Amino acid sequence: MLEYILSVAVLTACILIALQSYTVAKDSPPGPKGLPFFGIIFEVNITKLHDKLYEWTQQYGDVFQFQMLGKKFLCISSVDVLRETFLQEPCATVSANRSPTFTGKYLLKDYSDVAFASPSSLWEKRRKFVHRLLHTYGEGKASLENQIVQNLIPFKEKIRQTSAKDVNPFEIVDEFILSSIEMLIIGRSFGKEGPMQPLLKLELDLVNRISNPGTDGVLSVFPFLRFLPLTLSSIYHDAKSVHQKLLDILEMLSENDCEKTGIYHYMKETLNEKDENGNIWFNDKNIYAVLFNITAGAYLTTRGTLLSAIHILAKRPELQRSLQKEVDKVIGRNENPRLSDRKKCPLLEAVVMETLRYISHVPVLILHATSQSTTIGGYTVTKDTVIIPNVWTMHHSDKYWDEPFSFKPERFLDEDGQLLPATHPVRKRFAAFGLGKRSCIGEVFAKSRIFLFLSSLMQMATISEPAENDLLDFDPRKMAPGIVLQPQEYKVRFLLR
């Protein structure tokens, strides 16, 4: 049986190779040639594609192309070119498509979501709807801010219980974020022993692995692999199974245990609503897929940032003292932090921004595709070319940043210690959440949770290195792969102030 499958695979590859066009336009970008059809697949670690893209940028420049498994890719490693591509018309519209992906097709029920679907009238309506949901139940709703502050109470208690002990902070951070997600979705938190958090944590780990751009790239070309007894196929089927269990629990909780409402209730109320043309624009598949988007975005990004920041600060006691001084002055030692305090805490905001730049946790963002031929960076780019926004290289290029692999929050501060305005050239080089029509709609939601967590932590404790083992300097190049990079596990001590 295995020999039969391999024979079919080889035959298929040969046919594709024979059909592949080798014509390259004179004004096409440079780049590695690779093999026919297979392209550069054997030259890269597909789980850490950004590492090779960083290396190739040094060789081929800020705009280069390559082929992999029959697809043409254009890598953009220049902030200026990326801004022109995603912010200036007509290229902004041409480049707003999404490349066909295994995740979008099979995990998100034929692109029924927001993040992986290409623009259309239905997509526009879904995106505006989700943006409104996050604003209503995110920063724009004071009651949820109060819930998050209340959610910080058990977090603070855990810090007190583990004071001066070597502790793995991952469990503490996970519970804080997952509780926030529960409140966002269903209106209340059931805690780490409740029915939702274990499923959320398992599901999001699986999604992070299967949606890795390199892994997804292989599966999108060979989707039949999901039927074979492979690790990747197990991850895919487990992710679908866990997500369905989560939806079943949400339905049960929404009917029996929740007096307060959240995003799930509102989406259910919107089911079968008709648009101005009398067509249903939001259905069960959309709930299924959009919840994937929201939970993954809310968990993976915030988790990676907070755990990275804790590790970094443990090695920077002088920076912690400055942060504590700022928090004490603006918020006080006994008052709960509020989102309105963010503008008064420029150093803490700079630390968050530098953490996001330094780790570049979504190293190539979600890939785009051209809906027609266009010009990018002075080169002709054909229709259906996959665009890679190479944020990892942009954020670690010595052309844009002094000592890019050093952690320097002062990059984002002026001479008076105030946060640089959004129009400042340094801020315009920062693209952690993307740019233009496809920028992350959860940016405000993520930054809000990060601020409340870190300001509360600085109020009550100092992060110290563990007593038993040395804590190595944080190196973003050693983070665990996924569509969102995650820190390797470590231990620290929380010393009460």
Image: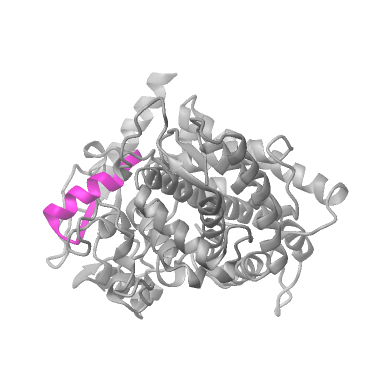
Q: Quadrant of residue 382?
A: bottom left
| Residue 98 at x, y percent in the picture | 43, 60
Residue 50 covered by magenta stretch: yes
Residue 364 lies left or right of residue 20; in this view the side is right
Residues drawn in magenta: 47-66
Quarter holding residue 113: bottom right
Image point (59%, 33%), residue name: 238
Identify the residue at image location x=75%, y=47%.
Answer: 250
Dominant SS of magenta comes to: helix
Instruction: Name the one closer to the observer, 332 or 406.
Output: 332
- x then y, percent, for residue 129: 64, 69
Residue 466, compared with residue 313, is above or below; it is above
Note whether residue 127 is visible.
Answer: no
Q: Nearer the viewer, residue 266 or 72?
A: 266
Residue at coordinates 46% horizontally, 47% vertically from top-left? 304
Percent coordinates x, y for residue 364 in the rendering = 35, 54
Q: Is residue 295 visible?
A: yes
Query: Residue at the spot x=62%, y=45% of the render?
Result: 156
For the image shown, how many numbered marks are present on the structure?
0
Q: Position of residue 182 (x, y in %)?
A: 69, 50
Does 93 appear in magenta? no
Quadrant of the drawing holding the N terminus: top left
> As drawn, is 450 to the left or to the right of 269?
left
In the image, taking residue 240 as reference, residue 245 lies left or right, namely right
Relative to residue 480, is residue 468 depicted above or below? above
